[in-house]
Image (cartoon, rainbow, N blue to C red):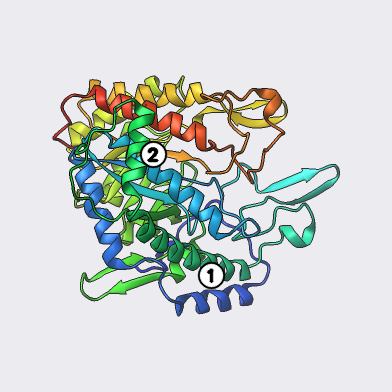
Amino acid sequence: MSWTPASWRERPARQMPSYPDLGALAQVESRLASAAPLARVADIRRLSGLIAEASAGRAFLLQGGDCAESFAEFGANKVRTVFNLLLEMAAMLSADGGREVVTVARIAGQFAKPRSAATETVGEITLPAYRGDIVNGAAFDPLSRTPDPERMLQAHRQSKVTIELLHAFSAAAYADLGAIRLSAQARLGLGSERGRWGEEAPQPRVFTSHEALLLHYEQALTRWDEESESWWATSGHMLWLGDRTRQIDGAHVEYASGVSNPIGLKCGPSLSADELLRLIDRLDPDNRPGRLVLIGRFGAKAAADHLPALMRATRQAGSQALWAIDPMHGNTVTAGGFKTRFLGDIVAEMTRFFDIADSQGVHAGGVHLELTGDDVTECLGGSLPLCEADLPRRYLTHCDPRLNETQALDLAAEAARLMRRRTRPASHAA
């Protein structure tokens, strides 16, 4: 059977909401199917080319942003803070004139979240779990928690404005690149001599990405491109599959297998080498550079037990997939009644990723982070140390704890040090 954007409906689908009004759902899907694409095919193809450069060892992927976007907290300033933070981190990662940094934000579509349980119980009341603003509301009452397809239209509108803002900020930031780079050099103690990046630099660009979780939304925004004779997900430039939705016979893998965008695949401790190779064959049968990003998420203590075998398998198979690390999700703990993460654990997993990649002859090609430019107190540690008593001060996340600006820049400085430690960039793919 040939693939279509609706093929996923014939497969078992996990982490999907149950909409009570199927007629309303169909109407929203129809409206989205006739709506303007959010991402242009030409830009998606450009990102694929840049990720291909990373898989060849000539670039590094920086992917980061909110755990989950919010309708209520949206505004130009919020988009600007994330854009500026990613730009400064990218400048730090490329400050010694080494690899180009490909900057991809978790934005303009990161509205849906997987949940460990379908329902939530408070006292004697059980309601559907909150699955992100694109599905339902966070307030614990029946009206808020009922999945509402109209929310997909609001997510589309907000994503469109977000992308327009990113374009505007990119044009404005071009004039400030010199100051951004000098700041990055100062943070890294590299001095201020000219020429580390060369005299000419392209206009900065931040691509968009999100987890392809809500397949009703993804299908409605899938478009056929005559020039490339391919299907494209126009909801964002890059999509990824989470650790809970990477079943090889499942709906999410089926959908991702048919669109031509770069696809990320979260790889956790439960993933075997054989299963990973089957997923690679399913998602990237042509072994095309720039198509697949393998994103490890193990936890600082478990990375050494699982990652070497996965990297070894992809290297031996000759896969062109790019390896990156998500050092956030495996390091979540509870302190003082709050979910949090320690910056020391995050740095430790990232360091192990680089070391294991070296030992396996694989390019350590990227990092995937949950972060915000806001002054939050959700993760602990860093150069302006936060302790457990600080957690309730500005704990604002709707789901998982995020690095604040200082912590994110601390992490970028550590990643830059790890990259400089490699005197010869890898010239082969994973």
Quadrant location of residue 196?
Answer: top left
Q: Identify the residue position indicated by label 1 in the image.
A: 157
Quadrant holding the N terminus: bottom left
Measuring 28% from the left and 30% from the top, which residue is drawn there? 311
Total tally of numbered discs in the picture: 2
Above or below, 45 relative to 103 = below
Left of 115 or right of it: where is 271? left
Q: Is residue 89 above or below residue 2?
A: above
Q: Residue at x 29, y 67 (%)?
A: 41
Residue 198: tell me if it is visible.
yes
What is the crowding at mark 1: few (fewer than 14 residues within 10 Å), some, or many (at least 20)? some
Q: Position of residue 352 (x, y in %)?
A: 36, 22
Q: Position of residue 143 (x, y in %)?
A: 77, 62
Q: Helix, strand, or loop for circle 1? A: helix
For the residue marked with disc 1, what is the amino acid?
Arg
Q: Residue at x 77, y 44 (%)?
A: 121
Q: Is residue 332 above or below residue 138?
A: above
**Mark identifier at residue 89:** 2
